[in-house]
Amino acid sequence: MKQHRNPWFWIPTLYIAEGLPNVVVMTVAVVMYMQMGLSDTDIALYTGWLSLPWVIKPLWSPFVDLYRTKRWWVLAMQLLLGSSLAGVAFTLNTPFWFQGTMACFFLMAFSSATHDIAADGYYMLDLDDHQQVWFVGIRNTFYRLAVIFGNGVLIPVAGILQVVLRDQKAFTWSLVFYGLAALFIAIWLYHSYIMPRPEADKPHDTNAREVALGVATAFKTFFSKLPPRQMVFAMLFLLFYRFPEALLLKMSVTFLLRPNSAGGLGLSPQEFGLASGTIGVIGLTLGGILGGMLAGRDGFKRWLWPMVCALTLPNIVYIYLSYVMPSNLIVISSCLFVEQFGYGLGFTALTLYMLYFSKGQFQTSHYAFCTAVSYLGLMLPGMVSGWLKDAMGYQSFFVLVMFLCVITFGVTLFIKVDPDFGKKTA
């Protein structure tokens, strides 16, 4: 029997657990490596590789679909995530700190990607269609709260500890990661008790042949969900919808933290935590909540193009910041709020399209395939973003990003969505 437990008991913490490893790999690692002396080119290249597990996760997502339950996978990956966080903390103070931390970050990324597969599958099994659409804003909200915690708490705490401990950067980051490891153990204990057991989330008795057949079937059904022409448009949308944001993702962080002499705004870790990690992510969160509610009221298709505009047009604030170079933290925070609010609203369109596309048999695997294509669209531009920035400078780089927003409009033009998808039904 399905446990009729209120989704509010587990959705917030589940998506905090999904968001934390992602923000650690994508942002906190960038700041840590920057403080440890790496250039922007090296930071973008090496941390870009950490996106690989999210790109190739379709290779093992059918295994997650077929073996054990989604709940089992969620809990197992949360334990592994805690272990990888402790591994980063331990290796930071060794002579092989870079190789050691990169290996632990790869383990963290693999565990997080697998956790994403299981958590999203669990979400779709436990909720009906309307609940999925209504809670998409809520789940994105708590995902963003994890981002606030990563950017707005962990990075400032590291900065404060560096002041107290006289700039012992490796040691302070070790303390931060040990604290994160303890937090994940606590999350695992809570979810072991609170997460319901949906009736549809049943264990499967499988062997290697059945798993291999399941993988092949999942791939085959994924690429036959739409006519060939529409399938191409769908893949282009998933791949390029966030193309400008992919270039901004890492370089916006270094722009805020690099000194004025290097073309950045020169924020301290504490100022960065307030402006980007808190005010900015609050905007991101509010945009995500609004996007889910609007789509749940009027349907996804009604709000698709406003969401596209919200994703792209606010990127112009980085052009303003790079040319004016304001020192007023209120001005900087306001710009980041506007840009991140637009991104939160616009990102809802991508999440809803993946939910819409994945409906039907093998929905967990198909959703994982969609997110993998989307992550590939983040990974490849992100890896070269540091090289582009170093070659062009921040000002020209941000102008280029704004120009490339036309790609997002282009790939959205040809996708098709059911006008009733997301609307509340009797």
Image (spheres, rainbow, N blue to C red):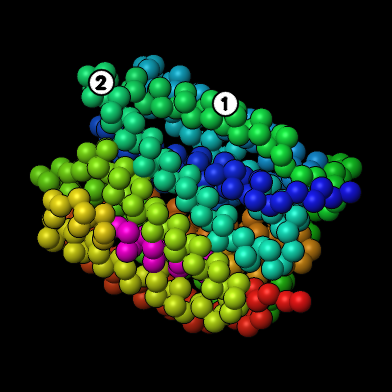
Which residues are the magenta region? 336-350
Residue beneath the point at 31% across and 42% down = 273
Q: Is the residue 189 above or below the residue 45 in the image?
A: above
Q: Is residue 182 above or below residue 227?
A: above
**Residue that numbered label 1 is attached to:** 83
Residue 200 as seen in the image, left or right of residue 141: right
Residue at the image position 51 percent from the left and 78 percent from the top: 303
* Residue 164 horizontal/vertical position (percent): 25, 20
**Helix, strand or loop: magenta stretch:** helix
Going 50% across and 41% down the picture, which residue do you hit? 20
Q: What element does badge 1 sit on?
A: helix
Q: Which residue is mark 2?
A: 164
Q: Quadrant of the C terminus?
A: bottom right
Q: Nearer the viewer, residue 99 or 180?
A: 180
| Foreground of the two, 157 or 173 | 157
- Percent across and percent down for residue 278 are 36, 48
- Residue shown at the point (71%, 51%) measured from the top left: 6
What percent of the width, then of the height, locates residue 307? 46, 73
Decide if residue 186 is on the left or right side of residue 288: right
Mark 1 neighbour density, 10 Å: few (under 14) some (14–19) many (20 or more): many
Amino acid, disc 1: Ser
